[in-house]
Amino acid sequence: MACAGVGLRLKAFLTDTFMITMPILYIIIYLIMGSREGFREHLAEGWLYIVAIHMSIVVLLWRLKGQTPGMKAYDLYLVDPIDDSKPGWIKCLLRYVMMQTAILSGIGLILPFLMRHKEALQDIVSGTCIVHRP
């Protein structure tokens, strides 16, 4: 099964950044930490809150619906390529952790361009695939 194109997945990722991540950042920085200065003083704690909340939301959406709002906007679905079903909790959590690893590593960003079926690092390690179904 071929994964969706890199362009569509990138658009979905950017959409999710604004729809999921930005509100979390705002809430943590200004409502929980009090200000940018408060966030800066407790940077590690602030980012721990942000990542924990973001991970909870994304993994929950992947598991229950098979897509995030950005994926829905571009008709993308997260599937287990073995039986074309929604992946389980462990696969979703592993995919999230590996997605963060891919973003932080150089090879993780270029891997989909090198792979025949456009798999990203998180696809390979978690055994999942994002497919396009218009």
Image: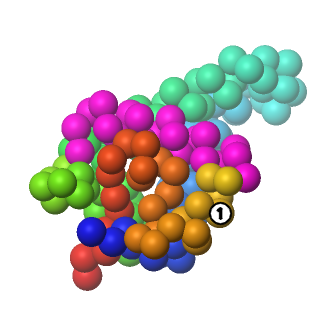
Residue sitting nearer the eye, 116 or 36:
116
Residue shown at 70% from the left, 44% from the top: 104
- Specify whether 39 is left or right of 69: right
Instruction: Judge from the rendering whether residue 11 lies leftward or rightward of residue 56; answer left or right.
Output: right
- Dominant SS in magenta: helix
- Closer to the camera, 51 or 4? 4
Locate residue 112, reporting x and y percent: 54, 65
Q: Secondary structure at mark 1?
A: helix
Question: Quick check: 124 above or below 131?
Answer: above
Q: How is the image coloured?
A: rainbow
Q: Residue at x 27, y 69 (%)?
A: 1
| Image position, residue 20 (x, y; %) | 50, 49
State which quadrant residue 56 falls in.
top left
Q: Is residue 79 above or below residue 52?
A: below
User: Is residue 92 within the magenta segment?
Assistant: yes
Q: Which residues are magenta?
A: 87-106
Question: Could you say where residue 98 lies in the image, as x and y percent from the top left?
Answer: 51, 40
Quarter occupied by the C terminus: bottom left
| Residue 91, picture quadrant | top left
* Residue placed under numbered mark 1 in the picture: 110
Residue 118 on the magenta segment = no
Q: Position of residue 8 (x, y in %)?
A: 47, 75
On the picture, is 112 further left or further right than 60? right
| Front position in the image: 116 or 132 | 116
Q: Amino acid at mark 1?
A: Ile
